[in-house]
Amino acid sequence: MLLEFNKLLEQYRVGDYAGLIGLLISLIGFYFTIRTVLNSKAASEQATAAVESMREDIRRSETVADFATALAVMEEIKRMHRSDNLSFLPDRYANLKKFLVSIRTSNSLLTAQDQVVMQSAIAKFSSMERLIEASIRNAKPIEHAKLNGQMSKHYDSIQALLVRIKNEIGRGI
Amino acid sequence: MSDSKIVRLIQGVVRQTNAGKIDWEVTEREEVFQASFANYSIRLSHSEADMGVDYWLTIINNEGLVIESVSDVQIRDELDGAYRIMENLYANARRVALGVDKALDDLLSIFDDDF
């Protein structure tokens, strides 16, 4: 009986076919395993990208908040220019400069052109601060229209930066 | 900074200004003009001296500190015609900052239409 069965298997080469089917099943299994691994890798990459994008958005929100504070200080300085109340101005200028320097040095979101805008403002405000200090020392009035003109010019360029960065929040750029 | 580097810097600024590649701007002070780059700004100004007018170039760093200031008098031994070069540079920077050339072009386009 067993011999007959073996003969039958041999005659119909069942072993060869079983081997081939086994190989096929292994290949299919291997294909699905690879696909699952690739899907997991893609999902993991997507999750990493989402976390990175969220981090960028948080950084952008912090930058927007810093810019908003800098703009508020600029508004305050303009008011102080008009009122000829010079004694607190050097403090405000120092504060403003500190904000702008900090935004620039800790920020990778700013383009080369943005850096030029920031540098122009920092250089100008430092010089204006020195001018105010000299005015206080020599008890000389300041030309507030001219100072406010410069302040407004930089206010506009910094606000443009703020709006651009704000628009990029949540867009995954 | 060595004087020769300053001279090279001034020559570079002159070249770029003549080529219209530097965006000079007015400042809070009359007759002082500023150009900014990613980490530095430069300013051009003049002052009255015993022998006439001195032209100054000042470098401001990324924290707003003046890190170098040089006049045509200080570099005249290293740069032939330093006074003329700085005077021309100042005049060209002023024209860019105040938009003189653009104003002239706009006005000329109005008056040239009459012919």
Image (cartoon, coloured by chain):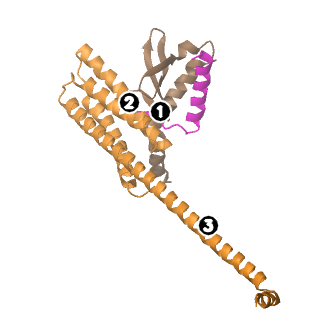
Q: Is residue B28 visible?
A: no
Instruction: Supply the letter of whichever chain is orange.
Output: A
Any mark on residue B35, and which? 1
Q: Secondary structure at mark 2?
A: helix
In the figure, residue A131 lies in which quadrant?
top left
A83 up-or-down from B104: above or below: above
Which residue sits at x=55%, y=39%?
B21
CA distance separating discs 3 and 1? 58 Å
Which residue sits at x=77%, y=82%?
A15
Instruction: Give yes or no for contact between labels 2 and 1 (Cβ–Cβ under 8 Å).
Output: no
CA distance separating discs 2 and 3? 60 Å
- Asked if the magenta segment contains residue A27, the reply would be no
Kind of residue at badge 3:
Ile
Kind of residue at badge 1:
Ala
Q: Earlier in the sequence, mark 2 or mark 3?
A: 3
In the figure, residue A168 lies in which quadrant?
bottom left
Nearest to the observer: residue A106 or residue B48: A106
Name the chain under label 1.
B
- Do marks 2 and 1 share a subunit? no
Residue assigned mark 2: A124
Instruction: Give chain B's shade.
Output: brown
- Do marks 3 and 1 share a subunit? no
Left-right relation of B74 to A50? right
Q: Secondary structure at mark 3?
A: helix
- Do marks 2 and 3 share a subunit? yes
Left-right relation of B6 to A133? right
Q: Which residues are magenta?
A: B1-29
Residue assigned mark 3: A34
